[in-house]
Amino acid sequence: MKKLLIIPLSFLIVGCSQDTGLLKAQIAELKKEIDVLKVQANMNEKKISSVEERVAKLEDKVAKDEQETFELKRKVDSLSTELEEVKNVVSTITVSPLVTLKPTVTTTTTEEVSEPREVVQVSDKDLYKQAFNAMESGDLETAKQIFDRLVKEYPDSPLADNALYWIGEIYYSHNDYETAASYFKQVIDRYPDANKVPAALLKLALCYKGLGEIEKAKETLQEVIDKYPNTPEAGIAKAKLMEMEK
Protein backbone atom coordinates (compact mmCIF):
# COMPACT_ATOMS: atom_id res chain seq x y z
CA MET A 1 0.00 0.00 0.00
CA LYS A 2 1.36 3.37 -1.16
CA LYS A 3 1.91 6.12 1.37
CA LEU A 4 0.59 9.62 0.63
CA LEU A 5 3.00 12.53 0.87
CA ILE A 6 1.34 15.02 3.10
CA ILE A 7 2.76 18.62 3.03
CA PRO A 8 1.71 20.71 5.92
CA LEU A 9 -0.62 23.57 4.91
CA SER A 10 1.30 26.00 7.04
CA PHE A 11 4.42 25.31 5.02
CA LEU A 12 2.63 26.17 1.76
CA ILE A 13 1.23 29.39 3.19
CA VAL A 14 4.64 30.49 4.39
CA GLY A 15 6.16 29.72 0.98
CA CYS A 16 3.50 31.74 -0.88
CA SER A 17 3.90 34.58 1.57
CA GLN A 18 7.64 34.68 0.96
CA ASP A 19 7.18 34.72 -2.84
CA THR A 20 4.65 37.55 -2.64
CA GLY A 21 6.93 39.60 -0.43
CA LEU A 22 9.79 39.12 -2.86
CA LEU A 23 7.66 40.21 -5.81
CA LYS A 24 6.50 43.29 -3.92
CA ALA A 25 10.08 44.20 -3.15
CA GLN A 26 11.05 43.76 -6.81
CA ILE A 27 8.07 45.89 -7.92
CA ALA A 28 9.02 48.62 -5.45
CA GLU A 29 12.60 48.54 -6.73
CA LEU A 30 11.39 48.78 -10.33
CA LYS A 31 9.19 51.73 -9.41
CA LYS A 32 12.19 53.47 -7.89
CA GLU A 33 14.21 52.83 -11.05
CA ILE A 34 11.33 54.15 -13.17
CA ASP A 35 11.15 57.31 -11.03
CA VAL A 36 14.89 57.81 -11.41
CA LEU A 37 14.60 57.33 -15.17
CA LYS A 38 11.74 59.86 -15.30
CA VAL A 39 13.84 62.43 -13.44
CA GLN A 40 16.80 61.81 -15.74
CA ALA A 41 14.55 62.04 -18.81
CA ASN A 42 13.14 65.35 -17.56
CA MET A 43 16.64 66.71 -16.98
CA ASN A 44 17.72 65.54 -20.41
CA GLU A 45 14.71 67.24 -21.98
CA LYS A 46 15.67 70.49 -20.26
CA LYS A 47 19.25 70.11 -21.42
CA ILE A 48 18.11 69.39 -24.98
CA SER A 49 15.79 72.40 -24.88
CA SER A 50 18.63 74.61 -23.62
CA VAL A 51 20.98 73.36 -26.31
CA GLU A 52 18.35 73.85 -29.01
CA GLU A 53 17.79 77.43 -27.79
CA ARG A 54 21.52 78.15 -27.90
CA VAL A 55 21.77 76.66 -31.39
CA ALA A 56 18.84 78.82 -32.55
CA LYS A 57 20.53 81.96 -31.16
CA LEU A 58 23.80 81.07 -32.86
CA GLU A 59 21.99 80.44 -36.15
CA ASP A 60 20.29 83.86 -35.85
CA LYS A 61 23.63 85.53 -35.15
CA VAL A 62 25.26 83.80 -38.12
CA ALA A 63 22.36 84.84 -40.36
CA LYS A 64 22.62 88.43 -39.11
CA ASP A 65 26.39 88.51 -39.66
CA GLU A 66 25.95 87.08 -43.16
CA GLN A 67 23.32 89.76 -43.93
CA GLU A 68 25.55 92.58 -42.68
CA THR A 69 28.49 91.21 -44.64
CA PHE A 70 26.33 90.98 -47.75
CA GLU A 71 25.07 94.56 -47.36
CA LEU A 72 28.58 95.90 -46.79
CA LYS A 73 29.81 94.04 -49.87
CA ARG A 74 26.99 95.59 -51.89
CA LYS A 75 28.00 99.04 -50.63
CA VAL A 76 31.65 98.44 -51.54
CA ASP A 77 30.66 97.16 -54.99
CA SER A 78 28.39 100.17 -55.52
CA LEU A 79 31.10 102.64 -54.46
CA SER A 80 33.63 100.91 -56.71
CA THR A 81 31.25 101.19 -59.65
CA GLU A 82 30.58 104.86 -58.87
CA LEU A 83 34.32 105.55 -58.62
CA GLU A 84 34.90 103.93 -62.01
CA GLU A 85 32.11 106.03 -63.52
CA VAL A 86 33.62 109.21 -62.09
CA LYS A 87 37.06 108.25 -63.42
CA ASN A 88 35.58 107.59 -66.86
CA VAL A 89 33.84 110.97 -66.85
CA VAL A 90 36.95 112.73 -65.60
CA SER A 91 39.15 111.07 -68.22
CA THR A 92 37.01 112.49 -71.06
CA ILE A 93 37.11 116.08 -69.81
CA THR A 94 39.49 118.65 -71.20
CA VAL A 95 40.57 120.94 -68.40
CA SER A 96 40.35 124.64 -68.93
CA PRO A 97 42.50 126.86 -66.71
CA LEU A 98 40.74 128.30 -63.69
CA VAL A 99 42.12 131.78 -64.19
CA THR A 100 41.05 135.21 -65.32
CA LEU A 101 42.98 136.93 -68.05
CA LYS A 102 44.11 140.51 -67.54
CA PRO A 103 44.85 142.59 -70.62
CA THR A 104 48.03 144.66 -70.72
CA VAL A 105 47.53 148.07 -69.20
CA THR A 106 49.10 150.97 -71.03
CA THR A 107 49.75 154.30 -69.40
CA THR A 108 49.98 157.85 -70.74
CA THR A 109 51.63 160.88 -69.32
CA THR A 110 48.27 162.18 -68.07
CA GLU A 111 46.21 159.19 -66.83
CA GLU A 112 46.10 155.42 -66.52
CA VAL A 113 43.87 153.61 -69.01
CA SER A 114 42.62 150.03 -68.46
CA GLU A 115 40.27 147.67 -70.27
CA PRO A 116 37.57 145.43 -68.71
CA ARG A 117 38.68 141.97 -67.59
CA GLU A 118 37.74 138.94 -69.67
CA VAL A 119 36.66 135.88 -67.67
CA VAL A 120 37.26 132.44 -69.16
CA GLN A 121 34.08 130.35 -69.12
CA VAL A 122 34.71 126.97 -67.54
CA SER A 123 32.22 124.14 -68.05
CA ASP A 124 30.49 122.33 -65.20
CA LYS A 125 32.39 119.14 -66.07
CA ASP A 126 35.71 120.94 -66.00
CA LEU A 127 34.89 122.46 -62.61
CA TYR A 128 33.83 119.08 -61.25
CA LYS A 129 37.06 117.47 -62.44
CA GLN A 130 39.22 120.20 -60.91
CA ALA A 131 37.34 120.04 -57.60
CA PHE A 132 37.46 116.25 -57.48
CA ASN A 133 41.19 116.22 -58.26
CA ALA A 134 41.81 118.79 -55.51
CA MET A 135 39.82 116.68 -53.06
CA GLU A 136 41.73 113.51 -53.95
CA SER A 137 45.04 115.33 -53.48
CA GLY A 138 43.97 116.49 -50.01
CA ASP A 139 43.38 120.16 -50.87
CA LEU A 140 39.90 120.18 -49.37
CA GLU A 141 39.58 123.97 -49.12
CA THR A 142 40.18 124.42 -52.86
CA ALA A 143 37.87 121.51 -53.64
CA LYS A 144 35.12 123.08 -51.53
CA GLN A 145 35.47 126.45 -53.28
CA ILE A 146 35.33 124.93 -56.76
CA PHE A 147 32.36 122.68 -55.92
CA ASP A 148 30.59 125.77 -54.56
CA ARG A 149 31.37 127.69 -57.76
CA LEU A 150 29.93 124.84 -59.83
CA VAL A 151 26.64 124.93 -57.91
CA LYS A 152 26.35 128.72 -58.23
CA GLU A 153 27.23 128.90 -61.93
CA TYR A 154 25.45 125.69 -63.00
CA PRO A 155 22.58 125.09 -60.55
CA ASP A 156 20.76 122.91 -63.13
CA SER A 157 23.78 120.77 -63.93
CA PRO A 158 23.45 117.00 -63.35
CA LEU A 159 26.66 117.38 -61.33
CA ALA A 160 25.26 120.04 -58.97
CA ASP A 161 23.83 117.54 -56.46
CA ASN A 162 27.17 115.70 -56.39
CA ALA A 163 29.00 118.98 -55.77
CA LEU A 164 26.76 119.86 -52.81
CA TYR A 165 27.13 116.33 -51.44
CA TRP A 166 30.94 116.47 -51.55
CA ILE A 167 30.96 119.87 -49.82
CA GLY A 168 28.91 118.22 -47.07
CA GLU A 169 31.38 115.34 -46.91
CA ILE A 170 34.29 117.78 -46.51
CA TYR A 171 32.61 119.48 -43.54
CA TYR A 172 31.65 116.06 -42.13
CA SER A 173 35.30 114.94 -42.29
CA HIS A 174 36.14 117.91 -40.02
CA ASN A 175 33.35 116.92 -37.57
CA ASP A 176 31.43 120.09 -38.45
CA TYR A 177 28.16 118.15 -38.38
CA GLU A 178 25.88 121.19 -38.34
CA THR A 179 27.33 122.71 -41.53
CA ALA A 180 27.58 119.31 -43.18
CA ALA A 181 23.90 118.64 -42.41
CA SER A 182 22.91 121.91 -44.11
CA TYR A 183 24.56 120.78 -47.37
CA PHE A 184 23.08 117.28 -47.23
CA LYS A 185 19.65 118.90 -46.74
CA GLN A 186 20.25 121.05 -49.82
CA VAL A 187 20.88 117.93 -51.89
CA ILE A 188 17.58 116.44 -50.68
CA ASP A 189 15.51 119.63 -50.99
CA ARG A 190 16.91 121.08 -54.22
CA TYR A 191 17.44 117.84 -56.14
CA PRO A 192 14.88 115.33 -54.75
CA ASP A 193 15.19 112.99 -57.76
CA ALA A 194 18.99 113.06 -57.99
CA ASN A 195 21.18 109.99 -57.56
CA LYS A 196 22.90 111.41 -54.46
CA VAL A 197 19.72 111.75 -52.37
CA PRO A 198 19.93 108.31 -50.64
CA ALA A 199 23.58 108.93 -49.69
CA ALA A 200 22.78 112.48 -48.54
CA LEU A 201 19.89 111.23 -46.38
CA LEU A 202 22.12 108.58 -44.82
CA LYS A 203 24.85 111.13 -44.04
CA LEU A 204 22.23 113.52 -42.64
CA ALA A 205 21.27 110.80 -40.15
CA LEU A 206 24.91 110.40 -39.15
CA CYS A 207 25.19 114.17 -38.70
CA TYR A 208 22.24 114.05 -36.29
CA LYS A 209 24.01 111.25 -34.43
CA GLY A 210 27.19 113.34 -34.24
CA LEU A 211 25.15 116.26 -32.87
CA GLY A 212 23.66 113.99 -30.19
CA GLU A 213 20.14 114.08 -31.70
CA ILE A 214 19.73 110.31 -31.47
CA GLU A 215 15.96 110.12 -32.08
CA LYS A 216 16.22 112.27 -35.22
CA ALA A 217 19.11 110.09 -36.35
CA LYS A 218 17.01 106.93 -35.90
CA GLU A 219 14.03 108.45 -37.71
CA THR A 220 16.20 109.50 -40.64
CA LEU A 221 17.86 106.07 -40.86
CA GLN A 222 14.40 104.50 -40.96
CA GLU A 223 13.45 106.96 -43.72
CA VAL A 224 16.41 105.73 -45.79
CA ILE A 225 15.25 102.13 -45.31
CA ASP A 226 11.61 102.93 -46.17
CA LYS A 227 12.22 105.19 -49.18
CA TYR A 228 15.21 103.42 -50.73
CA PRO A 229 14.89 99.76 -49.63
CA ASN A 230 16.96 98.23 -52.44
CA THR A 231 19.97 100.53 -52.18
CA PRO A 232 23.34 99.95 -50.46
CA GLU A 233 22.51 102.97 -48.29
CA ALA A 234 19.48 101.11 -46.90
CA GLY A 235 21.70 98.20 -45.89
CA ILE A 236 24.09 100.53 -44.08
CA ALA A 237 21.15 102.31 -42.45
CA LYS A 238 19.87 98.98 -41.08
CA ALA A 239 23.29 98.17 -39.63
CA LYS A 240 23.62 101.64 -38.06
CA LEU A 241 20.10 101.42 -36.64
CA MET A 242 20.89 98.06 -35.04
CA GLU A 243 24.04 99.54 -33.47
CA MET A 244 22.05 102.45 -32.02
CA GLU A 245 19.34 100.14 -30.66
CA LYS A 246 21.83 98.14 -28.58
Image: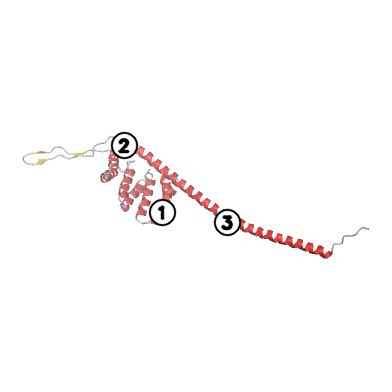
Q: Label 2's element?
A: helix
Relative vertical location of residue 134 with respect to residue 212 in this rendering, above or below: above
Q: Name the quarter where the C terminus is drawn.
A: bottom left
Q: Which residue is mark 3?
A: 46
Label 3 residue SS: helix
Could you say which is closer to the camera, residue 43 or residue 209?
43
The residue at 33%/37% (across/down) is 87
For residue 62, side relative to residue 116 (left or right): right
Q: Residues within 10 Å of mark 1 (few under 14, many from 20)?
A: many
Whole-Å distance between the Cαs marked 2 and 1? 36 Å
In the image, what residue type sits under mark 3? Lys
Q: Amino acid at mark 1?
A: Lys
Residue 119 or residue 38, whichever sits in front:
38
Using the rendered view, name the quadrant where residue 88 is placed.
top left
* Residue 200 at x, y percent in the picture: 36, 47
Tell me where residue 51 appears, x and y as whole percent: 54, 53
Farthest left residue? 109
Residue at 37% of width from left, 44% of height from top?
196
The amino acid type, in three-letter code, at marker 2 is Val
Nearest to the observer: residue 155 or residue 60? 60
In 3D space, how far apart are the residues under numbered discs 2 and 3 (Cα atoms)?
66 Å
Name the residue that disc number 2 marks.
Answer: 90
- Label 1 vs 3, first from the N-terminus: 3
Q: List the residue tagged with mark 1.
A: 218
> Residue drawn at (74%, 63%), measured in percent from left and top?
21
Give the mark nearest the N terminus, 2 or 1.
Answer: 2
